[in-house]
Amino acid sequence: MNRIFVCSIAIFVVYIGWKVNDFMVKPPLPEVEDKWWGPGTPRKVDNPIRNFTIQIPDEVLEDLKYRLDHHRSFTPPLEGIQHQYGFNTNLLKKIVDFWRMKYNWREREKYLNKYPQFKVNVDGLDVHFIHVKPDKVPEGVKVLPLLLVHGWPGSVREFYDILPKLTTPREGYDFVFEVVAPHIPGYGFSQAAVRPGLGPEHIGHMFKKLMEKIGHKKFYMQAGDFGHIILQHLAIWFPDSVLGFHSNFCVVMTPTSYIKHLVSAISPSFPWYVRPDHYDRVFPIKEKIGSRLRETGYLHIQATRPDTLGVGINDSPVGLAAYILEKFIVGTNNTFLEREDGGLEEYYTYTDLIDNLMIYWVTGSATTSFRLYAETFNKEYFASPFRRHPVQIPVACARFEKDFYAADGLLGEVYANLVHLSDHFGGHFAALQFPEVLANDVFVAIQKIRQKNILK
């Protein structure tokens, strides 16, 4: 039996070594083809940038009110259980009642229209974006273009508190930002693709074209969650367009990183790649892997059957609330699953959270937002040469304690030109939870990146 076990381990190690060696070979990146994602056949379109204002018809709001007022009775939670089995229906009732009786869309619509918004056609799809420029720029202060991209289950609503912090000049900095914040195609007010294949590399290409249409051939970038994945593709495929990339979601998923985790699980003395004060972010491996598996069930279903899931979520505002708000609990602090209130009001208001839900509801974009997972986590993506190429442009990583963690000794495998690394308290939705902290980090990081670019 011992001989069989040793042979099995040897075969496994040889296989992993072969896969790592195969992964280390970097095939040339193919060109990202121009594709038409809209209805009909490719054609030239009259393509000015158009002003856009959110104006939802009364009948959409009346339908929503009817659905909120006439949902089926909730199944009571199990005794002693808060959110461990999913969103607690006692809390859900409280939130739905707030939505029905206190939330005023017409007032919130005015708030959501506070920043200049536009649409422009890119590759057959109307892309919605917010575009905020600084009001008063002191002499000697340079205005830098910043592409700011959300993820799932977020929207541009996450950025409403951070936008003024990025676009207001600061003492001690000779630059300020002009921010372009688009909705990902299929999210919010951006049109969805009508055919399969619109994954992160093509969306990154679309956002490059968007910035060029606005007038920026070179720009800085900031993102978390799926926005990070999209902008990482953009940085790898179009490095000449990107001056620097700040991310609050610097993840590392390479074969060598998995091997390091595996070896460290066998030999606790091995984890040289983790700072001693961060051991609890990585170990015990078994516990961390178990937690990751528990909290990524949504990813599997969205990557395999997005349309099936979408039928239910897109038909029920109550279902939409339960599904998305559970992710806000987990993403903010997964220990909040054990709290009756889910910890939601510790950092957000119900109005903040329902604003985001409303963007999904009034646009009917739940299903199309799920599809991005199916267009990403598939065999074509995992076979893509993109995954074998590190990001070469200057990168800054802001790690938030309750979010996914990549150890210092792993980051270099993906981010070859890491200029700035910082650690903060907070969770996955940094722009919404701690806009001041994230904005400060962006300024500090971009200053370092600019200095490095000058020295080059």
Image (cartoon, rainbow, N blue to C red):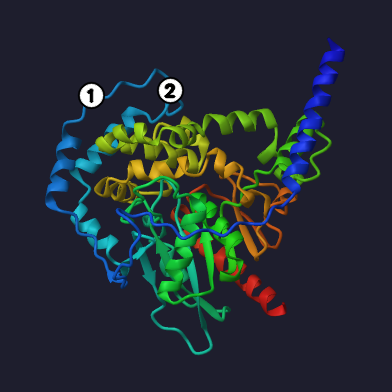
Residue assigned mark 1:
73
x and y, in percent, of residue 167 in the image: 44, 73
Q: Which residue occupies 16% across, 35% down?
A: 69
Residue type at mark 2?
A: Ile
Name the outermost residue toward the bottom.
139
Helix, strand or loop for disc 2:
loop
Q: Quadrant of residue 215?
A: bottom left
Q: In what quadrant of the picture does the N terminus appear?
A: top right
Q: Which residue occupies 79% across, 40% down?
A: 271
x and y, in percent, of residue 80 in the image: 43, 20
Q: Let me know if residue 229 appears in the view.
A: yes
Answer above or below: position of 64 versus 159. Answer: above
- Number of residues whose C-alpha sits closer than 10 Å to that of mark 1, classed few (under 14), some (14–19) or many (20 or more): few
Residue assigned mark 2:
81
Of residues 199 and 55, which is closer to you in this image?
A: 199
**Residue 44 badge:** none
The answer to whether 18 appears left or right of 109 in the picture is: right
Q: Earlier in the sequence, mark 2 or mark 1?
A: 1
Of residues 211 and 258, which is closer to you in this image?
A: 211
Name the outermost residue toward the top.
1
Q: In what quadrant of the picture does the C terminus appear?
A: bottom right
Q: Let me know if residue 316 appears in the view.
A: no
Answer above or below: position of 101 versus 200. Answer: above
Q: Which residue occupies 40% across, 49% down?
A: 154
